[in-house]
Image (cartoon, coloured by chain):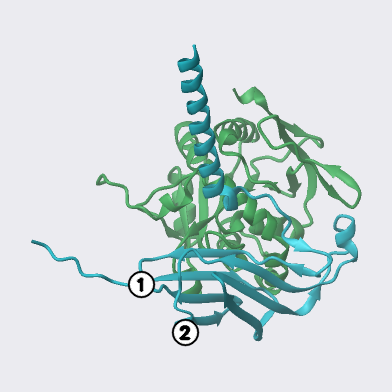
Chain colours: A cyan, B green
């Protein structure tokens, strides 16, 4: 019985580990959170991250934004994207606390999925969309084939 | 299983051979944005709703009134069906089946399903193209006369795929009308392209400029719905619409 119980406990631990891994892997996808913050008067922009072998490409939808009002910073594996709206956005009949809020900027922290070369980051703003090209820091080692 | 979907006409629809336009949240929210624009422009009246336990437990509030998120509107010879929530993958077959059966009772002139076609280079396209798919000779003729390009080879996914297939079997004159669109961002530009084509198909005069003028507002307003739609769309894999079918025609 003791051996059987030990085996069941190990299986339970194993399943719990898998559940944790899955939740970590998909946590960001299934995260249910507000895309607006009435205290900071900011909205979270829609973003998309594509990771290739060489670089990370982040695209952000930034309506009501001009290029000169975008600020981008990278530190500690995080990209900090802020953009001031050209005109504040207010939806007068929306919800409770929201109806009195004038949203003035977009703000989002984006966790970068790899180590990056911060000196070579490049960004383009076109038709209200910001596209950021972030080269990965890749150390290539040639493998000798015998 | 269609009995799980309840389509209710609060105002009995008695239009002979109506044009039925359906816009559900999908790629770029194109169908929804275009259909909403039609409803607003034509000042269509709310005439019914669709409810189901297969849908998320959601109601919406508009001017203090509790409403179903999936609604039907009518005006003159046009009916519009629109949803403010993404349709869960598990409800797609039943909803398509129920819609088809209900629409068939109206004996429609034409049913037009509005949608977005995901293209990876959307950011570089100043003008997007619309494409149509017709289910029978009547709709194919209408598409040709309207000078709209046809989608000849490709893959169609989601509710429109089921609806097109069943329309083909039942000989219901259905057209899937889509425009090249962002996959993951609300795309009023693509919706305007769909509206231009819809004007030609149904002989309407919907103001495209007015839609483009509120593009930025729509992009802000629809962020949450786009996010939720994208989560839901994972089940139907819209990027499969970029794939080439393996068999020759």
B232 displayed left or right of A137: right
Task: Say which quadrant the C terminus of chain A sits in.
Answer: bottom left
Q: Do residues under tags 2 and 1 come within 8 Å of each other at their CB atoms?
A: no
Q: Residue at x 68, y 79 (%)?
A: A65
Disc 1 on helix, strand or loop?
A: loop
- Residue A96 coordinates in the image, percent (x, y): 90, 56
Residue in the foreground of this view, choosing between B15 and B54: B54
Label ID, residue A138:
1
The reply to whether residue B25 is in sight is no
| Cα distance in 3D space between marks 2 and 1 | 14 Å
Q: Residue at x 51, y 44 (%)?
A: A21
Q: Residue at x 86, y 55 (%)?
A: A95
- Residue B147 coordinates in the image, percent (x, y): 47, 63
Q: Chain of mark 2?
A: A
Residue in the foreground of this view, choosing between B22 and B68: B68
Q: Which residue is mark 2?
A: A119
A40 displayed left or right of B91: right
């Amino acid at each position: 019985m003791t051996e059987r119980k030990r085996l069941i406990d190990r299986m339970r631990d194993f399943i719990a580990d898998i559940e944790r891994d899955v939740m970590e892997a998909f946590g960001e996808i299934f995260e249910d959170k507000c895309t607006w913050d009435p205290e900071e008067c900011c909205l979270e922009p829609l973003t998309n991250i594509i990771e290739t072998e060489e670089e990370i490409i982040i695209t952000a939808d930034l309506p009501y934004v001009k290029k000169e009002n975008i600020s981008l910073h990278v530190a500690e594996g995080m990209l900090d994207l802020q953009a001031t709206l050209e005109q504040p956005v207010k939806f007068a009949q929306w919800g409770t606390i929201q109806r009195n809020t004038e949203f003035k900027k977009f703000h989002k922290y984006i966790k970068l999925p790899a180590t990056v070369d911060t000196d070579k980051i490049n960004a383009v703003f076109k038709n209200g969309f910001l596209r950021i090209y972030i080269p990965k820091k890749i150390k290539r080692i040639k493998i000798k084939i015998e | 299983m269609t009995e799980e979907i309840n389509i209710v006409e609060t105002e009995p629809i008695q239009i002979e051979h109506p044009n039925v336009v359906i816009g559900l949240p999908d790629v770029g929210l194109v169908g929804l944005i275009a259909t909403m624009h039609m409803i607003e422009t034509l000042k269509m009246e709310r005439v019914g709703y669709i409810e189901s336990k297969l849908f998320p437990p959601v109601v919406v509030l508009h001017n203090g009134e509790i409403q179903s998120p999936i609604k039907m509107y009518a005006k003159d010879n046009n009916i519009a069906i629109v949803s403010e929530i993404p349709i869960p993958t598990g409800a797609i077959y039943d909803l398509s089946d129920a819609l088809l059966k209900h629409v068939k009772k109206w004996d429609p002139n034409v049913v037009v399903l509005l949608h977005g076609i995901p293209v990876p280079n959307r950011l570089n396209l100043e003008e997007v193209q619309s494409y149509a798919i017709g289910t029978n000779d009547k709709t194919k003729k209408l598409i040709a006369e309207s000078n709209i390009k046809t989608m000849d080879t490709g893959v169609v996914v989601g509710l429109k795929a089921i609806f097109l297939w069943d329309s083909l079997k039942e000989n219901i004159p259905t057209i899937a009308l889509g425009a090249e669109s962002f996959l993951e961002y609300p795309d009023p530009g693509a919706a305007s392209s769909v509206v231009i084509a819809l004007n030609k198909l149904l002989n309407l005069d919907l103001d495209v400029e007015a839609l483009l003028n509120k593009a930025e507002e729509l992009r802000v307003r629809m962020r949450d719905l786009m996010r939720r739609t994208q989560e839901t769309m994972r089940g139907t894999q819209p990027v499969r619409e970029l794939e080439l079918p393996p068999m020759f025609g």
